[in-house]
Image: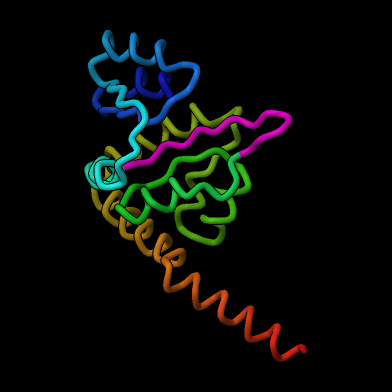
Amino acid sequence: LLSLAKNNPDIDFYIIGRGPLEEKIRCIGNSESNVKFIGFVSDKYKLASYYQNANFIILPSKRNPVWEELFGIVLIEAMACGCIPLCTDHTGPNTILDGTVLYKNIFKETEFLTHANGVLKAYSEDSQLITSDQNAAIEIAGKYSKKEISIHWESVFNKLSINK
């Protein structure tokens, strides 16, 4: 993510969250004008405000022997606010974006930086593409609304009661 920010000095990168690299990111944020370290945000309205002011959510997750990005709600929340996802090819993003126009923005971990740089360049040259893909993100996220999920579960429960 920091390399991506360095390669794209005209884009502001807001890093939200916490982890073992906080101090390093904070220091880099002090020297790189386009990197802003926000830290952990628990207020969902404040978090939504960050999403609404962003064009992208960048989720370059890295697998380890016991973890990979599964169904991350952060991706759905950001997309519901119009953020275009740039993600690594983990189960969650693959499931959420499979069969959609935004599937093009999922990259292998080893190729993330190269492809994300290319995609950011393409978006910077085509404002209509940004608008189109932001609308697609909102539409895709809508499939995971409370109403849509309840309809899905209702059909599951109905099938179960028919099979009894």
The answer to whether residue 36 is above or below residue 133 is above
- Along the line of sight, which residue is nearer the eye, 1 or 105? 1
User: What's the image's color scheme?
Assistant: rainbow
Task: Indicate the position of residue 20 as horizontal and vertical percent values.
Answer: 50, 17
Can you say which quadrant of the picture contains the C terminus? bottom right
Residue at horizontal 45 percent and vertical 53 percent from the top: 102
Residue at 47%, 37% in the rendered image: 59
Residue 73 in the image: above or below residue 154? above
How would you classify the magenta stretch by its main secondary structure?
loop
Rendered residue at 42%/45% (across/down): 85
Total tally of numbered discs in the picture: 0
Residue 131 at x, y percent in the picture: 26, 54
- The answer to whether residue 27 is left or right of residue 34 is right
Q: Quadrant of residue 25?
A: top left
Q: Where is residue 29 in the image (x, y as percent from the top left)?
A: 30, 15
**Residue 149, how many percent across, how many down?**
50, 70
The answer to whether residue 142 is left or right of residue 130 is: right
Indicate yes or no whether the magenta region holds residue 87: no
Query: What quarter of the picture does the N terminus occupy?
Result: top left
Which range is magenta? 56-68
Where is residue 111, by image quadrant? top right
Determine whether, in the image, residue 145 is placed left or right of residue 92.
left
